[in-house]
Each structure stands twice: as C-alpha cells, then as structure tokens.
Amino acid sequence: MTDAALYLFDDHRARRWAPLSLTRPAGELLHGCLTLRQRAEHVFGTQCLGHVSRTALVGFDEAGAAPVIRPDDMARRGTRILLSSRAVVDVQEFEPPPRSARIFVDGAPAGWIVADGDPLPSASRLRNPETEPDESPCLALDGMILGHPWDLVAANDERITRDVSHFFPNDDATPGAHRIGDHHVSLGAAASIEPGVHLDLRLGPIRLDDGVRVEGPARLTGPLYIGAGSTIFGGAVGTSSIGPVCLVRGEVAHSVFLGYVNKAHDGHIGHAFVGRWVNLGAFTTNSDLKNNYGSVRVWTPEGEIDSELTKVGCFLGDHVKTGIGTVLNTGTVIGAGSSVFGGLMPPTAVPPFSWGSGRDFRDYRLEKFLETAERVMARRDQELSPGVAEVLRVAWRKTAGRRAQWAEGSDAVKVSVLGSGSAGNSIFVQAGNTRILIDAGFSGRAIARRLHTIGVHADAIDAIVVTHEHGDHTGGVGVYARRHGTPVYMTERTQAACTRILRGKETVRAYDPGRPFHVGDVRVEPFLTVHDAADPVGVAVVDECTGLRLGVATDLGRPTAQIRHALSGCDMLVLEANHDEVLLHTSHYPVSVKRRIASSHGHLSNQAAARFAVELLHPRLAGVVLAHLSNECNRADLALDVVGAALHKAGWSGHLEVAAQDHPTDLLDVEELQYRNGPAQLSLL
C-alpha cells in the first residue's frame, strides 16, 4: 500500500502513558528493534506522515521522528491508514481491502483504512476507537495491543526475538567473542565486538546495529538489540532494547532505553523503561522485585494500578537526571525533566520538572532546564528543535499544578471530616502526594465547595474509597467520579448495591474487604464491620512513607475483635458517636428504628464510643474526631462530655473534637498534633 497516507493516533489510553506521553507521542516509543511507528511503516509499506495525539504535543518535530499534527491536517483525499499507536502489528502478508475498513489487531479495534472520498473518523472516535462500532468490513491483522507502559517492557524479549529473526536473519561471524547457545548474532555496518566479550545466545538472538561498539570484558545476553551508534563499555547487558547513541556500563536487564541515554557507570537497571536524553549518575540502581514477591503497583494519571507483574522496575521520562548513588524503588515513576540526587530514595511518583532529593522537591526552573537540555544535546551533535522546545515549555506549564500540590503536602498527613451525620458523610485524607475521599455522601458540588474551604481543588482527588452503599455515604459518588474523572474503589457487593448512582461511565475498581490495596502514597486496609449493609467496611489509611496511620470507624454496629485489631496503633481516629442512649429512647423515632440504631448492626452510642476509644488508646494517638452524630438523638456537647471524660480518666490529653454535618473540620496535620501534645502518659498502660 505504498500510495497510502499512514497516520498513527494516540487514543485515550496512550495519551495517559505517563511519564512518557507527556513529551512525545506513543508511536515514537521503542519496542523490540523498532519504534511503534517504524513497525507500522514496515507492515503497511509506506511512510508515516504524522501522529495525532494530545494538543499539547502538536509541533513535536524531533529529528528522525514523524511530527505531531492536528486531526484537520490529515489528508482529505486518497487512501489513508489510521492505526492506533498501541497496536504492535506482526509483519505479515494481507490483502488490502477494496474499500474503507476497520482494522482489528488480535481481535481488538485498532484503526481504519479510509478509501478515497470517504470521511475520516472524528476526533472523538480516535480517542475511543472501541466505543463506536460500525458496519465497515474488517481487516484482521496478527499482533497485540499494548495496554499500559509496562507492557512495552514485559513483552519486549519476545518482540526482539521476532524482529531479529525477520529483519536481521543472517548470522555474522564474531571473531574473538565467546558464544554460548544456538541463536544467531546480527551485526550492522561497522559494528565491532572486542575480544573477551561473552555472547549468551541460549535464550535469544543479538542484533548490534550500525556503528555499535562493544568493549571487553562484557557479557551480552539475548534477546538483545543495541541501536545505532551506541557503546557498551562493559558489564552484563541483556534481554533489553537499547536505542541509538547510548552509553552503557554495568547491569542492564529486561529494559528499554529509548535513545541518547548516558549510563556510562556501574549500577543495576532492570525491568525499566528509560526515556530519551536520560543521564544516570554512577551507581544509580533500581529495584524490580518487592520483598514479599507480590505484584507491583504503578502510579498512573488515573491513580495507582496493579500491574499484575512481580517484576517491574522504574519508568523515567525524557531528560531525567539522577545523581551519584541514586536508588529507585520498585515501580517508581519519575516525570520528564526531573533531576533527582542526594542519595536519598525518592518517592515512587516524582512530578515532572522536579528538582531535589528524597521527598524534598522544588520546581526545576524552565529556562535553566532548557539551557541544560541544549547543552547536553550539543555534546552529541544534536539540537533542541523549536517544536520540541515548545512541547517542553507547554509540559512544564501544564504540570505546575501537580508540582505545587506536591510542595504543599508531600511531608504531611492531613485529615478533614468534610461533614458527617445522617444527611451525608465524607472524609478527606492527604498522605504524601496522594489525596483521597473516604465516602462521598454529599452532592458533587457540595463536596467540591467543602474541599475548596480547606484549600483543596476538586480535581486533585486521586480516589474515592466507598465503605458501603447507604445514601449518606454514596449520594455524590457517581456525579463526582464522572465530573472529575476520579476512580472509585468499592467492594463488588457494594457496587452491585449502587446501581442507581453508577452509570457505567465511572472508573470503578473492586477491592477485597479483607485485603489491603494501594492508592498512590497510601495503603488502604479495609476491614469488615457488622452494619446493616451489603458489604460494610471500615478502613485504616497508612502513609507508606511515614507509617502514620488513620482509622475511620463509622457505622460499626459493634466493635469486634477484627475491628479492634484493624484500628490498633492508629495515630488518628475518626470514630462514630451516633447517639445518646437517653435521647434515642425518648426520641420520636418508631420503635423499630430505635431498635435498629441500638442493635449490634446499627450505630455506637456515646457511651459505647467512649469505651471503644479507651480500648484503642496508645501513647502516639494524636487526635480523635467524633463523627456520624444523629441530629435527632445526640448533641456535640454530650458526645464531647462522655467521650472526653473517659479519655481524660485514662490519662489521654490529645486533640478531641466533633465533626459537624454542615461544614468541614479544619485540615488537621497528624504530625503537628503529635508534636504539640507529646506522648501520652496513659493510666491504663
């Protein structure tokens, strides 16, 4: 199809492939021995004329790449091929359709062939190609669709083997090198291997592109691709794709270096994707396996996602720099343009264009960053093109809010009960760079207004964690999730009970009520309660960096051994004190309602809350917020008197307050409360 115009498009998923998608289209990412664009060009036999991606990338004009264009800039006549950048199409023979057709790869919609005279798909269809089926003929192609950035790494070994076998099938002589295994070695023009290099070909082939130099001693393990002009200075390098003009020494395994990466020193990089123009300081090392051998969770713009992989390293955006001795945790994501140094382990999600050490980051000044980028590129005889420079400027401006959020709250665990009672419940929790809501029982606008009161923007919420389906905890969940694109976490049974508020357009993630899960910098530990709901839970929220622990215990029914265990050791408690026993008995509620409230499946009274609070006391407990007070059967002064007296008798003098129904509490800093109060001298201890 040499006369067709080929375009690659980034759908809604590819546009969120952080940290890579911030500064380049997904089609310019390396997978196997080719970029995704180069692979599409080989399959369809024509040059790619442009990428259709995020508006912020329009003007991208990196040397050797296809430009990023606007949808209106695509050709209006002639045959046009529009292929998803997430599609990895196998090289294969196929019969071009005589008229317009939909492209399917591995059974999934992946683009269109548009015949001369037929209209192009709309911009919305390019963002969501799977949502609008049509009656066009289908062109089914072999290959795979990449779902997440870590798929570029996980599927890379097999892709290298296929690419070398297809594009570089000849086995070249390697005099002076020691071979092990039966796969072959392909050498490009002027590629050289010094004597004393070991080539391990037991698991796959090796391709050294034009001008590659491998200095001894070194061990190269296939499947392996080394891009044109790269140099291997020694060490163990294998099962990876190394892009053009990279300098590599030390250990590199199961990774992708996009190009112009300087790793000229020792250190281990494994199961990682490293962007273009990255400079790794001496002994920079990343972990790619958790201590418990569990699956690795990775930060994404939609929140933290379980990769379902046990081996995941790091993801470094373009122009990232690390200092000497930098250590990166499993699943770390460092945004483009960041400089990380100082020897302290950074958090697992560093905002783009950040500059600092450990958790102490500040803005990398834009002009200083661009000046450094130009200087680095000039050392490789490359120029920072006007288009790429503008893309970087736009990226810096668009990510300023995320850096500001980090600077404001990266070192604190803060809590505000936005409101609590029978008319609505919602709690804001901030830990590190993560902000979550526990329940959303008010309208979407009311929650946004209350967040604004405590200085938090509604779009900054990373997740809503739902404890159970009752309307005073879920009334605003659906609207808020749809309006702000916020993921919702709930158990499967709770989701089944929330059909009236969910329309299928929300991002809903199920959690097991007996197993912890992660959202950004926090670990959420749900535990079952005995409230009269489909699958009621309470939660403990743990800051993974500081270990500070917040317990949220409303709608308990009664304290059980499991609940006591889950809430032990909390630094802060939000605890139900629903009713005064006398006021409940004399209220106008029907007898059946009174019995339900006072039952073991109902709510805690002030007296029960006081007894339970004393049970949970320990020296580090900084504060207790009493919540879910009944408007009819309780008063703030009664709850404070009963619970406060019991805590005071036990020797505790921390922060105690009552959450109101109609306005949020102050944003309480847990560490500040601990510092202010000091360790409690408890009589029961």
Image: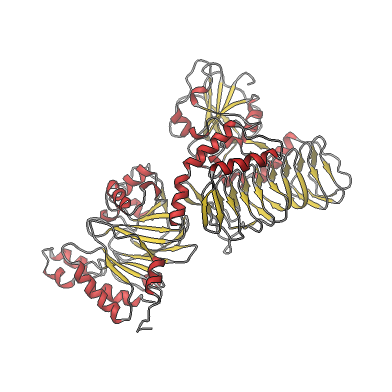
272 relative to 136, above or below: below
Instruction: Tell me if residue 147 can be seen.
Output: no
Residue 16 x %, y %: 50, 41
In the rendered image, the quadrant that contains the N terminus is top right
Pick the front one: 446 or 295: 446
Instruction: Tell me if residue 431 can be seen.
Output: yes
Q: Which residue appears at 74% of the width and 47% of the height?
A: 222
Query: Residue 8 falls in which quadrant of the image?
Result: top right
Residue 62 x %, y %: 62, 33
Query: Residue 524 falls in which quadrant of the image?
Result: bottom left
Residue 445 x %, y %: 28, 46
The color scheme shown is secondary structure
Residue 670 x %, y %: 39, 66
Q: Which residue appears at 40% of the width and 73% of the height?
A: 568
Query: Residue 627 falls in which quadrant of the image?
Result: bottom left
Locate residue 361 relative to residue 503 in the image: left or right.
right
454 relative to 149, above or below: below
